[in-house]
Image (cartoon, helix red, strand yellow):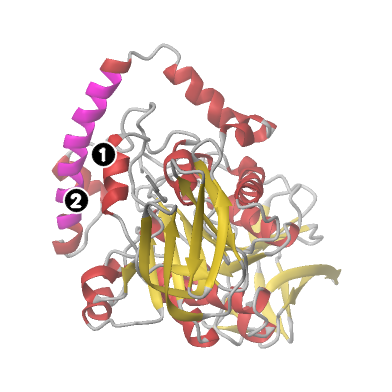
Amino acid sequence: MIKLPAVFSDHMVMQRDKNISVWGTCDAEAITVTLGDTSVKAIVKDGTFEAMLPPRKAGGPFTMTISSGQEEIRYEDIMIGEVWLAGGQSNMELELQNSKNGKEVVANIKNDAVRYYYTPKVPYVGEKLYEAEAESAWDLCTPEKAGRWSAVAYYFADKLAKELGVTVGIIGCNWGGTSASCWVGRETLENIGEVRKYITDYDDIIAHQDPDEYIKEREEYLVYQAEFDKNVGKYYETAENPTWEEALSLYGENKYPGPMGPRSETRPCGLYECMLQRVCPYTLGGFLYYQGEEDDHRPYSYYELLSGLIRQWRKDWKDDTLPFMLVQLPMFRNGGDEPDYQNWPFIREAQMRVFQTVKNTGIAVILDKGEFGNIHPTEKDSVGQRLAMQALYHVFGKADEKETFGPIFDRYRIEDGKMVFHFAHGAGLHCTEEQVTGFELAGEDQQYYEAEAKICGEEVVASCEKVSQPMYGRFCWTNYRPVTLFGENGIPAAPFRTSRWDGAIATGSRNGWEF
């Protein structure tokens, strides 16, 4: 019997200009894979096979067959184009129908150039996962299907398809509230000292866990949380000025993510096993990644964790050059957070460091697209389009720097007791308010104070009466504040500090907020 992974189905998109991997299981000695007018043979070894189709130009539709001589599987309406995997947590997961203007967009949608495969979301390998996979398939872009797609991924794919003139397929592989540690293998966590605590903490939890009691607790949690989520969702849709505190007072405790254990979607390495590995090594053009919120309690190790994730994914796909386009976290502060809670700047800094130090990466700066009190900002079209611009620039050479990047801090100098900041991609610096805000200066004592700042050409000059001899500077180094400094293309200046040794530390707690 021939069996291929669920990611192979009618309407699938296959990657252009690369060898195309087709793999599965079979009880015959060999199989033949035919795509259009091209056939390749593969030997079955220990019940498994992998055939490698030669590169093809964009086009279609095609038919693909996999035959053993006694049995044949057939897939119809296959397009050759661009295939990208959309990974991350809830802001990548946020559905098109729930995004800004999403219901109207979905109601009128018909986009023959975009298709989507939603990797089944079952948090452990077993019968429930196999059943979900059997029901999964590539979707065409219709009002009946597209509403549940990732909004960010859809807008990315839509822009890419229009600019390149090819079909774009997205493999959605994301889950809300998950750490990057959920999306890598155990060896990756064990071999990076700064992130090993993710796996040791989990091992400590399950070491003396009673399996039956754990399953009972989890089932009770699932029933409770489903009702809680339904009530809170309706509350946010109907209340005039909804707040998280009022939601909790009305509907009780938010118990997410529930008891930790082998069936939890938030356990380290879990979704790597039951989601990412289920679609690997489907041939890709690159990765999209929007995540980081869930790791803000360990911000100093996020650079190593994210770098390790990129290495892991590229290794698994046997291509250490696969493009990786990431989203830098926007402004956010929940109304109930302690005022001194300032951890997101360190996550944003780690994301920018990854972009600047790991090859074949891009970064979509979306500082201006956050919402106070809403960790799931709904304006996802700009996010997807900025991601697409990064891909068009870094991968396809179809965009230039001026339209792709906002201002990114480059260097500074001290002049007459003032700190002068220079920006790469800084042409057309402008302020959207009466005054540039968000700049702070510190002297030798490393105590920061708000600075007065003004734009001078491609630079910003900042001064502060309390800091006569500035040694350190930073911009938008906070979880949330209005963003006022932009490039001429409407992309905001990326947050930064001039030194990672300025004495700043992550502070505070999330005051009960669950990501």
Q: Residues within 10 Å of mark 1 (few under 14, many from 20)?
A: some
- The segment highlighted magenta reads 213-234
Tags 2 and 1 in contact by the CB under 8 Å rule?
yes
According to the picture, the residue beneath numbered tag 2 turns out to be 232
The relative height of residue 143 versus residue 444 in the rendered view (above or below) is: below
For the residue labelled by badge 2, is the local secondary structure a helix, a strand or a loop?
helix
Q: Would residue 312 be seen by someone viewing this image from the given angle?
A: yes
Left or right: 388 with respect to 74?
Answer: right
Distance of mark 2 from mark 1, alpha carbons?
10 Å
Q: Residues within 10 Å of mark 2 (few under 14, many from 20)?
A: many
Mark carried by residue 254:
1
Give x and y (percent) for residue 149.
33, 65
Task: Report the amino acid beneath label 1.
Answer: Asn
Give x and y (percent) for residue 212.
27, 16
256 inside magenta stretch: no
The relative height of residue 407 versus residue 304 in the rendered view (above or below) is: below
Closer to the camera in the image, 296 or 449 = 296
Q: Residue at x 68, y 34 (%)?
A: 192
The relative height of residue 396 versus residue 130 in the rendered view (above or below) is: below
For the residue labelled by badge 1, is the local secondary structure a helix, a strand or a loop?
loop
Please identify the dominant SS of the magenta region: helix
